[in-house]
Amino acid sequence: MTGDSRSEGPVLLRDDRDGVRTLTLNRPRRKNAIDTELWGCLRDALDDAGTDPDVRAVVITGAAGAFCSGADIANPGTAHPMRKMRVLTDVALLLHELPVPTVAKVNGVAVGAGWNLALGCDLVVATPESTFSQIFTKRGLSLDLGGSWLLPKLVGLQQAKRLTLLAETVDAEQAHAMNLVTWVVPGDEIDAFVDELACKLVAGPPIALAQTKALLNEGADRTLRDALANETRAQAMNFATADAPEAFSAFVEKREPRFTGQWTVSRAQ
């Protein structure tokens, strides 16, 4: 990823290890606030992760004890606001539609678009020191990066209004109680916890995980009839992979399954 004169090294670090891609926002002097360059790098990295068959899970985190302090309004750049928002829209949709599980590893602050970046992940791990705020109205702005869609689904309309209209800061325990954080773990244990969590996701059946994520994401906006039709379509695809028979065999043989996502339906002659 390209560099930034206001931080050391690339603005986005990428580490690929054992099927896990870790993306680290790397503008520590700005508490990893996202400027135009970093938005573009994040969009490209997520797009690449969605098409790389070796990536089975994605972890998003921030450098130097902060997750993300939001968009960098101190360095707004010269692009038209609508052009800037198109990049944010790309990032939010890519994260939502990524066919692999995603984990936000939150140390320190997650503010504004930074918090919504974490909420856009499938699972959120925080430390007791983590703090969160939908700070937009304090900046004369309305929420973005999917916050208007995500928050009501996660906490209900009234609590979403509380968080956004008042722009309150909440701690990790409050966020956990409101279903905005999946786990709160001690700061000295979060790396090991997320590593183990990512390993579990990588070991899962990739096609089934992708289908399950999509079904859950889409189900909230569908009728029961639509949801059942989508479940039928997804299940048919799962049965066309090697993973379902492998799971059944492993159960009978009392061993751990080895999931590959391999397609087993024969091509038409």
Image (cartoon, helix red, strand yellow):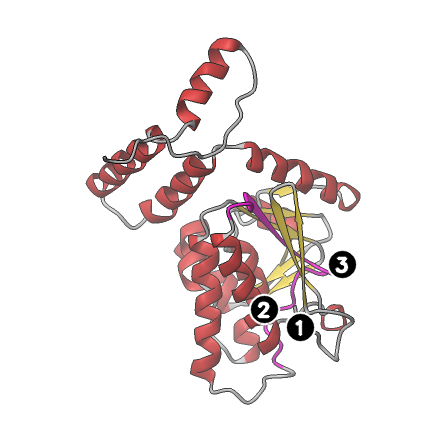
Q: Identify the image quadrant of the C terminus.
A: top left
Residue position for label 3: 65
Residue 214 lies, in percent from the top left, at 38, 45
Residue density around tag 1, few if under 14, some if 14–19, many if 20 or more, within 10 Å? few
Mark sitting earlier along the chain (1/2):
1
Q: How much space separates mark 1 and mark 2, taking CA atoms?
A: 8 Å
Which of labels 3 and 1 is toward the front?
1
Residue density around tag 3, few if under 14, some if 14–19, many if 20 or more, within 10 Å? some
92 or 128, which is in the foreground? 92
Residue density around tag 2, few if under 14, some if 14–19, many if 20 or more, within 10 Å? some
Over which residues does the magenta segment extend? Answer: 53-73
Q: Is residue 121 toward the left or the right of residue 156 in the image?
A: right
79 or 265, which is in the foreground? 265
Residue at image x 70%, y 74%?
3
Residue 57 lies, in percent from the top left, at 56, 45
In the depicted structure, whether residue 44 falls above or below residue 189: below
Q: How much space separates mark 3 and mark 2, taking CA atoms?
A: 21 Å
Q: Is residue 123 toward the left or the right of residue 187 in the image?
A: left
Residue 172 forms part of the magenta stretch: no
Question: Regarding mark 3 in the picture, which secondary structure is present there?
Answer: loop
Question: Regarding mark 1 in the picture, which secondary structure is present there?
Answer: loop
Mark sitting earlier along the chain (3/2):
2
Q: Which amino acid type corresponds to the residue marked 1 in the rendered image?
A: Thr
Residue position for label 2: 41
Question: Regarding mark 2 in the picture, which secondary structure is present there?
Answer: helix
Residue position for label 1: 2
Residue 62 forms part of the magenta stretch: yes
Mark 1 in CB contact with mark 2 (< 8 angstroms): yes
Q: Is residue 161 visible from the viewing direction of this image?
A: no
